[in-house]
Every structure is written in C-alpha cells, then in structure tokens.
Amino acid sequence: MSVSLHVRNRHPRRRLPVPALRRWLRAAMAEEPIASRARHGGELGLRLVGAAEMARLNRLHLGHEGPTDVITFDYAGPGQPGLWGDIVVCLDVAEEQGRALGIPWPRELLRYLVHGLLHLCGYDDLVPEARRVMKRHENRLVRRLGARLDVASVENAVQR
C-alpha cells in the first residue's frame, strides 16, 4: 500500500517545487519509525502557508496567539494503521528560524515535515520525556535525510 500525497502551496508569495517536496515526504516515509506506519497506506496532506494563515489556525485549533512552525492534524481512528492527516507548515517561520539558527530555511522546512510525520506516528512533544524521544528521532531523521536530499535545490527553485 502507499500513502496518497496532496501538497498545496497556500503561501501568498512563495512557490515551492511540489515534486521536490513529494520526494522529501516519500524519503521520510521510507525511514523508521515513520516507515512502519506508512507501509499501511493512508492519505497525507501538506499545506504550506504564510504567517497570517498559520496564526489564524493556531488561534482556532490550539488557542495560541501568533504563527507557529507546524501544526499536525491526525485523522486516524483509534488503532487505525497508516498515516492519515494533514501537516500545515508556515514558510515564514521556517525562514525566520533558519536565519536565527544560521541554517538554510529549506533545512528547517525539512525538520517541520519530519516533526509532523512523527506526530502522525503517535509521537508527542508535550511531556518532557516523550519530547526527548521525539526529538532524538527528529534529529536523526533530519541528519540522514539532509545528507541524502538536495535541500538547496528547493531554495534555488523558489519563485517569489
């Protein structure tokens, strides 16, 4: 079985290469612990948004003010195998964070994709011990994928 991917760019100014983002998602879904869920199929949406839209979603769904990096909506029923959900990423926050960390913003975007996928696999970052476990997986996957994927190609292909 395979996971059906739906990528939508809703950012008001940036256009990212959708085929590259699909490759990133597929590469991440081939890595454990994500692969053990992805092999059961599912439907995954990725939506790229700006700061205003992310702030609206953050307020509406989480009750927090301002934009955040990534929000994951898990639609899987109890015990349902596979990946079923949407990952919403704020490109403006990725760019801001990348600049603050001194890394290319597409690498930060890759982190957000991995983070969202881990949430869909049941990982949680609200409790300190669970957050440490999730962060270990996230860091390992970003290192592995960042070494394999052409992250710079996304930055070079961006249309403003």
Image: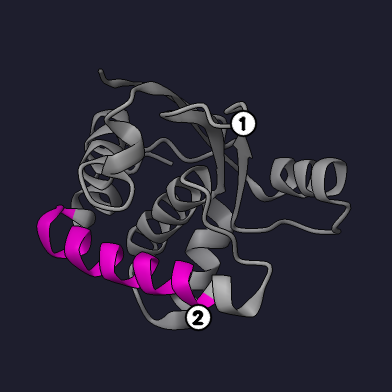
**In terms of sequence position, does the residue under pointer 1 or pointer 2 come before the other?**
1
Q: Which residues are magenta?
A: 132-150
Residue 73 coordinates in the image, percent (x, y): 63, 37
Q: Mark 1: which amino acid?
A: Pro
Can see residue 98? no
Residue closest to the eye, 142 or 106: 142
Q: Quadrant of residue 23?
A: top left
Instruction: Give yes or no for contact between labels 1 and 2 (Cβ–Cβ under 8 Å).
Output: no
Q: Would you say 148 lies left or right of 103 here?
A: left
Q: Secondary structure at mark 2?
A: helix
Residue behind mark 2: 100
Q: Is residue 117 above or below residue 109?
A: above
Give the residue drawn at x 19%, y 49%: 153
Q: Would you say 1 lies left or right of 72 here?
A: left
Within-10-Å neighbours for mark 1: few <14, some 14–19, many 20+: few
**Quarter holding the N terminus?**
top left
Q: Mark 2: which amino acid?
A: Ala
User: Foreground mark, 1 or 2?
Assistant: 1
Find residue 78 and name its label.
1
